[in-house]
Amino acid sequence: MPLALTAAIVAVTLHAQWSSQTGAQLDARVQALRAAGEPVLPGDFARPGIDGAAAALKAALAKMAAEPSEAMGALDDCDVIEPPLTDFEAELIRDAVGDHADTLAAVRAAAGASMERPPVAIGAAISSLNPVRAAAGLVKYAALGRAHAGASDAAMRSADDLPTLARYAAGDESLIGHLVACGIDAMEVELRVSIAPKLSIGAAPPAVAPAAVRAAIDRLLDPTEPRARLMRALRGERSLILYNLTATEAQDNPMPVAMGLDDPVSRYVARPLLNTYAVACLDVMTEVIRCSAEADAPAFNKAMDGWLTAAAGRNGDGALFASIIVPGMRQALETQFRIQTCREAAATALAVRWYATEHDNNLPAKLEDLVPKYLPRLPRDYLATNAPLRYRPGKTPILWGVGENGRDDNGVEARPHQSVKEQRETNDEVFHLAARPRKGH
């Protein structure tokens, strides 16, 4: 037998063995996760689908995107829209709310709707989420306008609509959808903190009822829904990575062409390597998901760093793919913990205002004075280890957490001249609990 033919037969045999071995490793990983009740591929996810109210919301969002109003455009062009509103801003908000009343009604009607749906390609996901962000801005403007008009009950009901849009954004189990939902959560927090100092709380409209305030506080303090959104998004990201590396014949998979595997022969040759990559990525994402169950940012980082050290010691493909995947996942988790801290602050801002309305507009001397009537517990700082948010009463009362540097700087705020890097390294996350004049107004 010619030497070249012999070498070819040996190469094909070794390739087949390698492909079989790596395929078996991948199948074992997938089956172990499925046995533990984990969704692994896109088809494993339970998706009830969107119901009638959610479908109506989708149609309203599309209509809003197709028929933008001049008032919304003018509001979006403003640098900042916050209390106290100018007369011009209040008029623009009234016009925008009137122009898009059907969108606001659809958001309200979809409050309890099922939102889960299959993911789409990233480009389509981004474009499909833009109307959700626009609608969230509309809801925020509506709440600000109603608070400005003294309708505290209507303003709080508008703020209560933002979680519906966050659920819609996160309904496709994608990480980008989850991050948009986090942005809407941040918008809700900023809104509630800004309108809290002037809220009227009482039994009769236009005051907001104490029970409605307590319901908002309890929801903001409950991390269950945002954490569930996060875990679903991380599992969705894992399934997408695995699908892209294994479903090389699928028409909707852009990965093979992006990797230069645009014909059956190249895909066959690359199969064992793709299996190896898939196992490594599956292991990395599974570990990210495990560490994400930690209670706060320091605990997550400690768990993640411990696994990374062990992976680096093994010098395998896991370490390589961890260096690619983990930094982005770490940022997503830090965003999650920061937003949850902000939710705690928003709940506390509402509780402080509620307390003040029942104590001759005097603020509590300490946060413990709010528990248990106004707050069920002290607010947590999820960027610190088992620590509460800090509080300083006085003429300019503030609430603060350690911020991204993980250190308590005694309520130091970002200054305009600071770079983003300086702000992250030297400042706390500060929330003001009293109404403040706007710069330039």
Image (tube, rainbow, N blue to C red):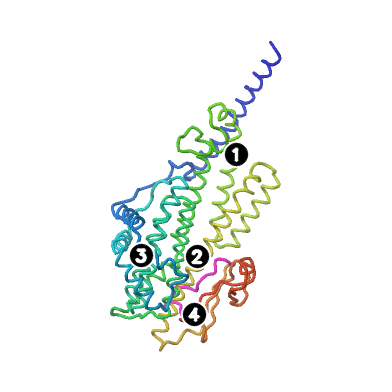
Which amino acid, mark 4? Gly
Counting every numbered tag in the picture gives 4
Few, some or many residues within 10 Å of mark 3 (<14, 14–19, 20+): few
Name the mark on residue 277. 1
**Contact (CB < 8 A) between labels 2 and 4?**
no
Q: Position of residue 330 (x, y in %)?
A: 58, 56
Residue 315 placement (x, y as % from top left): 70, 43
- The disc label shown at residue 70, or none: 3
| Residue type for callout 3 | Glu
The earlier-in-sequence mark between 1 and 2 is 1
Q: Which residues are magenta?
A: 370-384
Nearer the N terminus, badge 2 or badge 4?
Answer: 2
Q: Which residue is mark 2?
A: 340
Q: Are marks 4 and 1 in contact (CB under 8 Å)?
A: no
Q: Are marks 1 and 3 in contact (CB under 8 Å)?
A: no
Question: Disc 4 vs disc 1: which is toward the camera?
Answer: 4
Whole-percent x, y for residue 207 in the image: 32, 79
Residue 380 among magenta residues: yes
Identity, as a three-letter code, of the amino acid under mark 2: Gln
3 or 2: mark nearer the eye: 3
Pick whichever of labels 4 and 3 is earlier in the sequence: 3
Indicate the amino acid at tag 1.
Answer: Tyr
User: Circle 2 — which element?
Assistant: helix
Neighbourhood count class around disc 2 (C-alpha, 10 Å): few under 14, some 14–19, many 20 upward: many
Select label 2 or label 4 by which is in front. 4
Determine the main secondary structure of the stretch shown in magenta: loop
> Which residue carries the number 4 mark?
440
Q: Marks 3 and 4: in contact by CB < 8 Å? A: no
SS of the residue at dot 4? Answer: loop
Give the camera-side residue of 196 and 141.
Answer: 141
Q: CA distance from mark 3 to mark 2?
A: 34 Å
- Label 1 to label 2, Cα distance in Å? 34 Å
